[in-house]
Image (cartoon, rainbow, N blue to C red):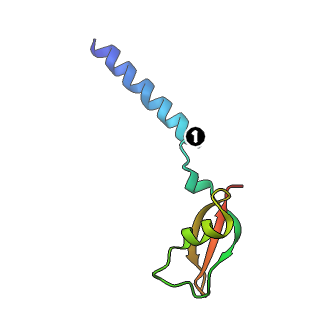
Amino acid sequence: MGRNMNSVSYTVLLLVLLAASTENLKSVDATCDTFLGECGPAPFPATADCFTCCVDKYGHPPACRGIVEGTDKHCHCYQLP
């Protein structure tokens, strides 16, 4: 019984490593990297929600992420490639 459990553990570990190496475990957020456009004023207010601005302007989908970035603090919207 001990050998069977050990064999099963190694098999599961191998499958997890295989899935991770082929990038099957990527999240949607990680692939949401194609620039869609800017939203709101610059600088974008710290109290406002950038993603909500993107969804209001472009819809969901295509907007899947909104990030305040850059030296001028613009709200940048991103979509799936």
Quadrant of the image containing the C terminus: bottom right
When asked about the image quadrant of residue 34, the answer is bottom right
In the figure, 76 relative to 13: above or below? below
Residue at (62%, 85%) from the top-left corner? Answer: 41
Instruction: Give the side of residue 17 with respect to residue 80, left or right.
Output: left
Q: Residue furthest front?
A: 56
Q: Amino acid at mark 1?
A: Asn
Quadrant of the image containing the N terminus: top left
Q: Residue furthest left?
A: 2
Residue 30's x, y, as percent? 57, 55
In the figure, 21 relative to 27: above or below? above
Q: Residues within 10 Å of mark 1 (few under 14, many from 20)?
A: few
Instruction: Give the side of residue 16 with respect to residue 54, left or right.
Output: left
Name the residue nearer the viewer: 9 or 74. Answer: 74
Instruction: Give the side of residue 8 with respect to residue 19, left or right.
Output: left
Name the residue nearer the viewer: 10 or 68. Answer: 68
| Residue occupied by mark 1 | 24
Residue 24's x, y, as percent? 58, 40
Name the residue nearer the viewer: 45 or 4. Answer: 45
Q: Secondary structure at mark 1?
A: loop
Instruction: Give the side of residue 33 with respect to residue 16, left or right.
Output: right
Q: Residue furthest top?
A: 1
Residue 44's x, y, as percent? 56, 84
User: What is the total number of numbered labels drawn onto the structure image?
Assistant: 1
Residue 31's x, y, as percent? 62, 54
When asked about the image quadrant of residue 80, the answer is bottom right
In the figure, 48 relative to 15: above or below? below
Residue at (65%, 65%) from the top-left corner? Answer: 78
In the figure, 23 relative to 67: above or below? above
Residue at (55%, 68%) from the top-left corner? Answer: 51
